[in-house]
Image (tube, rainbow, N blue to C red):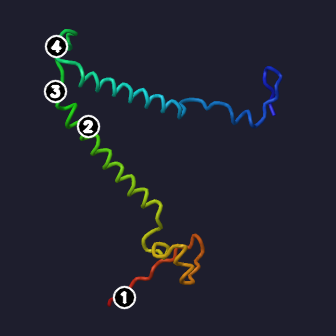
Amino acid sequence: MEEESSGRILTDADAVRAPPAGFRFSDYGYIGSAGIALATVSYLIWTCPPYNWLQSVNIHYYPSRYWAVVPVPNYAVVVTIVVAIGFYIGLTFTASPPPPTLKSLFDECSEELLGIIPAPDDYQLIENLPDI
């Protein structure tokens, strides 16, 4: 146990409650929410104001609004769906047993019905079939 400069004795619980040094996960949340807010505001500035108002503010180069309404949102939706499908497939591969094991054929319910009771982490390989 250590003693703080105020005379209070520090315990192990105080060490757990101490904030971590450097970049914290809450900072990622703040940066993410600020980035989403900035992207939303810039998207609304791109799509909403009329051309004559933009020219009065001296904004002369302006990307076509077609890109804001059709391809960019569609691209975002397609990329989100493809990434979600890839994530789901990867999660399924990590959560299932390897293919050449009996665990991929039998679960807890079928093991009880068939009288097969392998060890919980027993990955017995399936024997290769000879030529038929």
Q: Is residue 131 left or right of residue 50?
A: right
* Residue that carries the numbered disc 3 in the rendered image: 64
Observer-nearest of 27 and 22: 27
Task: Kindly report which numbered mark, 1 or 2, lies closer to the viewer in this rendering.
Answer: 2
Residue shown at 56% from the left, 73% from the top? 122
Q: Which residue is mark 4?
A: 52
Secondary-structure class at tag 4: helix
Count of numbered circles on the image: 4
Residue visible at 78% across and 24% down in the picture: 4
Q: CA distance from mark 1 to mark 2?
A: 54 Å
> Is label 4 in contact with label 2 (beta carbons under 8 Å)?
no
How many angstroms separate mark 2 from mark 3 (CA)?
A: 14 Å
Q: Amino acid at mark 1?
A: Pro
- The residue tagged 1 is 130
Q: Is the residue 42 above or below the residue 107 in the image?
A: above
Quick check: marks 1 and 3 in contact, CB under 8 Å?
Answer: no
User: Which of the two discs, 2 and 3, labels the residue nearer the N terminus?
Assistant: 3
**Amino acid type, callout 3:** Ser
| Residue 12 location (% of width, % of height) | 76, 37
- Sequence-wise first label, 4 or 2: 4
Question: Residue 131: horizontal and vertical position, in percent?
Answer: 33, 89
